[in-house]
Each structure stands twice: as C-alpha cells, then as structure tokens.
Image (tube, rainbow, N blue to C red):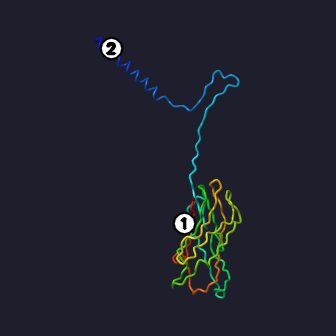
C-alpha cells in the first residue's frame, strides 16, 4: 500500500475515535444531586436535596337540592310544590311544601370554593303565572334557613342566609348573600325550607313550573 494511503487511513481512524469520545462526553447520563465523602470520618456529613411542587386548581361548587358528591355536576332539578286546601285559600295559613331532597319542601345547600369570598344569589324570570295569565308574586314564598341535622366532614354546618328573591314584577337577580372565606376557603352547608304564605286570594289554577316563571336559578360567584 502506498505510504500516503496508509497515512490517510490512519488519520481517519484517529478522527473517528476522537468523535466517538466527544459524543460519549455529550450524552453522559444526568444524575440526581449527591455528595460523596471519603474517608467517612466520625461526624462527617453528606447532603442531597429535592424540590417539591404542589399545584392546587381553583374550584367552585354549589349544591341546592340533590347531588351525588362535592365534585359532581348533576342534571337533577328538584321540585317544590304547594297545594292549598279549599277551606284555607287566602286565609294566611302557611302551607308546607312537598318535595326537595330533604322532603317537606326542604333542600340541602352546600357551597365549596378555594379562591376567596363567594357571593350567592337567586334569579327569577317574573312572578309565578297560570295558563290564563293570573300570577302569584315571589313575596308569597318564604324561605327559612337552618343548619342540617348532621354535618359533612370538612364543612361548617350553619344557617346560610337565603339570597332574597327579586320581588319586582319582571323578576331578575335578588339580594346577594356573601360567604366570607377563611384563608381563601369556603366550605359551608345548611338547609333551606320553603313555605307558601297564602296571604293573597288568587284565581284557581296551577301556578309556576319551569314554563310559567316558577324556576329559581341560584348562582355562586367566587370573588
């Protein structure tokens, strides 16, 4: 073999070996932090550190009536109904309700949020009407607030003030109930019981239902 060919081949091998060595340095595996002490004399130390991060998402939960859990979105809308005895129409005898997840016109109210104070409000679309156009105002529906019979772990059981209905003839948002957070956390539950005051003398008929102004929408707003 010609000397120049031998020299060219040798240089190529040296170049390849150098490239492989450099590649090995570039892809050397990364290691967690560690300390090696030698010799390990009495009271010698070695340290290693870890950094932890915890991410908590901001959440908001409102329950009025039936629910399957504190992180559930349920489609069930409870109904509260009142039937006035013929002998008591308009005589101010308070009529208890039927329905609600707690029965007898009562519902569970639960609010959970971790982003600060929460405003709770009610919205109606107008008075409760019947098929022939007569109406009963929301002022005839009374709401009593109380604590629940038992407490859910982690929640404060209290009489949550009901956000008063808008009593205007066209409906709208009511009066805000403010739930004050502690360390930006609100976890409170209670009970609302609805009754019909029966202090007016309306025409015969069925008033309300979702189609005739009988639906209330409750809204929790995290401030």
Q: Relative to 72, does residue 167 appear above or below in the rendering? A: below
Quarter of the figure that contains the N terminus: top left
Secondary element at tag 1:
loop
| Residue 13: % across, % down | 37, 19
Picture quadrant of residue 44: top right
Which residue is pictured at 66% across the width and 74% down the height? Answer: 104
* Number of numbered labels in the structure image: 2
| Residue 166: % across, % down | 57, 73
| Residue 202: % across, % down | 59, 86
Quarter of the figure that contains the C terminus: bottom right
Which residue is pictured at 58% across the width and 76% down the height? Answer: 167
The foreground one among 15 and 182 is 182
| Residue 63: % across, % down | 60, 64
Q: Distance between the residues labelled 1 and 2?
A: 83 Å
Q: Which mark is residue 191?
A: none
In the rendered image, the residue lying farthest to the top is 3
Q: Which mark is residue 7?
A: 2
Q: Name the residue under label 1.
A: 75
Secondary element at tag 2:
helix
Q: Relative to 76, does residue 23 appear above or below in the rendering? A: above
Picture quadrant of residue 97: bottom right
In the rendered image, the residue lying farthest to the left is 2
């Amino acid at each position: 073999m010609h000397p120049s060919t031998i020299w060219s081949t040798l240089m190529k091998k040296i170049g390849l070996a150098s490239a492989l060595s450099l590649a090995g340095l570039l892809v050397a595996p990364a290691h967690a932090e560690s300390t090696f002490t030698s010799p390990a004399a009495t009271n010698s130390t070695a340290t290693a550190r870890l950094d932890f991060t915890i991410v908590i998402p901001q959440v908001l939960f409102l329950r009025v009536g039936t629910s399957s859990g504190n992180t559930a979105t349920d489609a069930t809308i409870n109904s509260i109904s009142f039937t006035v005895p013929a002998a008591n129409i308009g005589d101010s005898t308070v009529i208890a309700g039927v329905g609600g997840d707690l029965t007898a016109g009562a519902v569970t109210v639960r609010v959970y949020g971790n982003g600060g104070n929460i405003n709770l409000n009610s919205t109606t679309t107008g008075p409760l009407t019947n098929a022939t156009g007569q109406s009963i105002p929301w002022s005839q529906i009374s709401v009593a607030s109380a604590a629940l019979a038992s407490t859910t772990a982690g929640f404060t059981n209290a009489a949550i003030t009901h956000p008063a209905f808008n009593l205007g003839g066209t409906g709208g948002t009511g009066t805000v109930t403010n739930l004050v957070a502690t360390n930006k956390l609100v976890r409170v539950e209670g009970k609302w019981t609805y009754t019909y005051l029966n202090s007016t003398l309306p025409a015969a008929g069925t008033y309300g239902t979702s189609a005739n102004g009988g639906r209330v929408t409750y809204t929790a707003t995290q401030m």
